[in-house]
Amino acid sequence: MRTGSSLLRMIALFSVLLLFVYFIPDTEARRGGGGKSVSRSGHASSGSFRGSQSYRHDSRGHNRSNRSYSNRDRRDNQQDRRSDGRDNRRDQRDDIRDDRRDHRDDVRDDSRRYRARRMVIGSTLTIASYDALTCHRTIIIYGGVTYLRCGTVWYNQAYSGVNVTYVVVNAPPGY
Amino acid sequence: MKGGFCMVPLFRWSSIYWMVFLLAGALVGAPVHAQAPEGTASANDSALSILKRTLNLLANQKQFSFTAELGFDVVQGDGQKIEFGSRRRLIIQRPHRIRLESQQRNGQQLQVIYNGSEISFFSARENKYAIIPKTGTLDDFLNVLVEELEVEIPLAQVGYKDFPEIIMEKIDAGFIIGESTVAGIVCDHLAFRNDQTDFQIWISKSGDPLPVRWVITYKHNEGQPQFWTQFIEWNLNPKIEDSTFSFTPPKGAERIQFMSQTSAYQQGVETPIKEDKQ
């Protein structure tokens, strides 16, 4: 009897473990907190009267291939999740940049007035990424502009499109 | 009995009239409907003339305002289609004043004002704003907004002086679908197309021929996403006050910069683009 009860306990424990292994990742994906990241901008968001012949996700196919794995693959891929997440985030950033470029192209096509495109030198951080930095912070106001120093790096807050970002800039004069 | 006798042949004759009428209608109507989607000259001309009348009305309007709800599909990497959108309010006073308010579904509220001398941008969620001096017409403002400030402007394109030409040159074929009631307004339902998009527009049949709704389908993009706009209110003579085109920062709002005002942008590399790639 004792052996039978231990066996039952082991089966129950194994079932719970299986539940974690197989179902929790899907639940996270459904919430958008796990592997599933939601793009909020695409070609239709421009409202342009022009389309594109090939869709960006189609050509890259990265997200699609990641989503079509089987249960066994899912278990095997557990340890790859973290790096996939990094890849997805990188792809997302690429997508956002590409979508923005597409949009500019669309409006240029609509208005036929586009003249030049300028690429920003240096890196930008989201508000959350900046807040997560561990460094000594100083605020300097120079020429009506607020400069934030985090360690040895200087930042300005600036709109990148409609989003507030922290962009790495030159130190204000005298610093 | 006499009256009853007379009723029978009358009924029969009327039935024959109806049959002949319907048969004629079917013979005449069928080819029209079959050809219309291909953009027959007559159908195309009628549809184009209705559309042109609307576009010209807006282009020649010194000032106007509208409130609209818009939505668009974003096809995810796994093919799932998800809709996002916003409510927009736009006030235009030519030649160089515009106020655009956008209430996003995620709670964010954005405001852009151009008064001919500066552009202000405010985001309510962060309570931050930026101001950049710029001069010029509405066209100049719209170009700066897209090229330099990288702000998406669905529906603001109606502010371009040559908006009618911009739209008309993108139409390959079109036809009138018929009368259609949208949000209680009787409209002409028109359908147009080019090699990349299908475009439907519903134009009010009573009063000023203003758009009530339009839908753009990106037929070659995966999932064929759509962009739709439902116009809630039009006003061709909006009340404009001194404060309409002047920005007053809300209490506690922090001034930041546009990316183009930072040294990171100013030291960036500019890549010239051919002005007209056609």
Image: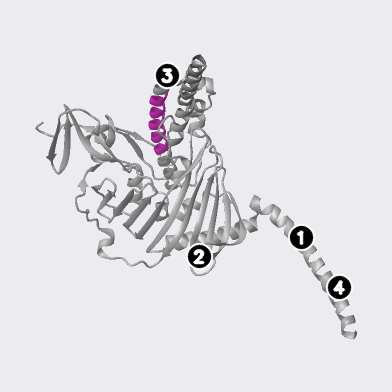
Circle 1 Cα neighbour tier, 10 Å, few/some/many (<14 / 14–19 / ≥20):
few
Residue B209: give its label: 2
Q: Quadrant of residue B7?
A: bottom right
Q: Which residue is mark 3?
A: A79
Q: Chain of mark 2?
A: B
Say left or right for A139 vs A122.
Answer: left
Relative to B230, A165 lies left or right: left
Packing grade of label 3 (10 A; few <14, some 14-19, many >=20) is few
Q: Is residue A97 magenta?
A: yes
- State whether residue B109 appears in this view: yes
Q: Do discs 4 and 1 belong to a common subunit?
A: yes
**Which label's residue is closer to the chain start, 2 or 4?**
4
Q: Earlier in the sequence, mark 1 or mark 2?
A: 1
Q: CA distance from mark 2 to mark 4?
A: 45 Å
Asked whether disc 2 touches disc 4, contact meaning CB atoms under 8 Å apart, the reply is no
Q: CA distance from mark 2 to mark 3?
A: 60 Å
- Dot 3 falls on a residue whose secondary structure is helix
